[in-house]
Amino acid sequence: KAGVTQTPRYLIKTRGQQVTLSCSPISGHRSVSWYQQTPGQGLQFLFEYFSETQRNKGNFPGRFSGRQFSNSRSEMNVSTLELGDSALYLCASSSSGQRTSNYGYTFGSGTRLTVV
Amino acid sequence: EDKVVQSPLSLVVHEGDTVTLNCSYEVTNFRSLLWYKQEKKAPTFLFMLTSSGIEKKSGRLSSILDKKELFSILNITATQTGDSAVYLCAVEGTYKYIFGTGTRLKVLA
């Protein structure tokens, strides 16, 4: 069973550009969540999608957006990049997003975004 | 505001030592508490705790939850260098998990 796949693995962008990251969940998982991880702030919740609907959103500016497709694949977009957006972006999938099983989330390996 | 606080922030021990990692939380609509181990990139799942006072064990690792006092501990006995990692605690709220900043554990040979 394939795991959670995130692409690309690494990305370098300049300030002001926009970026789109992709996450393919485990087959059969309908919930996808996105997190930003930085050394100082740890893992911060961005948003969660289930069956193409955003069910929850963290405290990030509107430059951060996402969507989920009918096949459960999800993308997140960051517009007008700032230096502070440099981080590891992790996505995680689960079957329902709540009280999933004994396995909580399964995380992808992340996309390392560097903004210069 | 929901928050999860882990302590200590970092820890250096020698092989064979026993360590205790702490996680306290204030999260509305608590559903579960999870522990993850993160070595390079993707955090890997260790435990999920939902009931107070019931210890979960996996080899040298064990964890327990106290829902009255709103905390959990993760114990690692007979530590090995392979246990060196960041240990993350996460609390499940409504359609999201709130993570602590982690405890960085380094085990010296």
Image: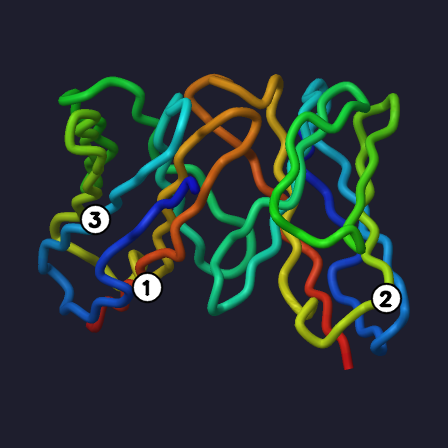
Q: Write down the residue under mark 3.
A: B22
- For badge 3, the amino acid type reads Asn
For the point 85% across and 23% down, the residue is A71
For the point 20% across and 72% down, the residue is B109
Q: Is residue A69 above or below residue A19?
A: above
Secondary structure state at the residue bearing disc 1: strand
- For badge 2, the amino acid type reads Thr
Q: Write down the residue under mark 1.
A: B104
The x and y percentages for residue B107 are 23, 67
Q: Quadrant of the N terminus of chain B?
A: top left
User: Are the two marked residues, 2 and 3, in contact with CB atoms closer than 8 angstroms?
Assistant: no
For the point 80% across and 55% down, the residue is A63
Measure how far apart labels 2 and 1 are at the Cα level.
Answer: 33 Å
Which mark, residue A80? 2
- For badge 1, the amino acid type reads Arg
Q: Residues within 10 Å of mark 3 (few under 14, many from 20)?
A: some
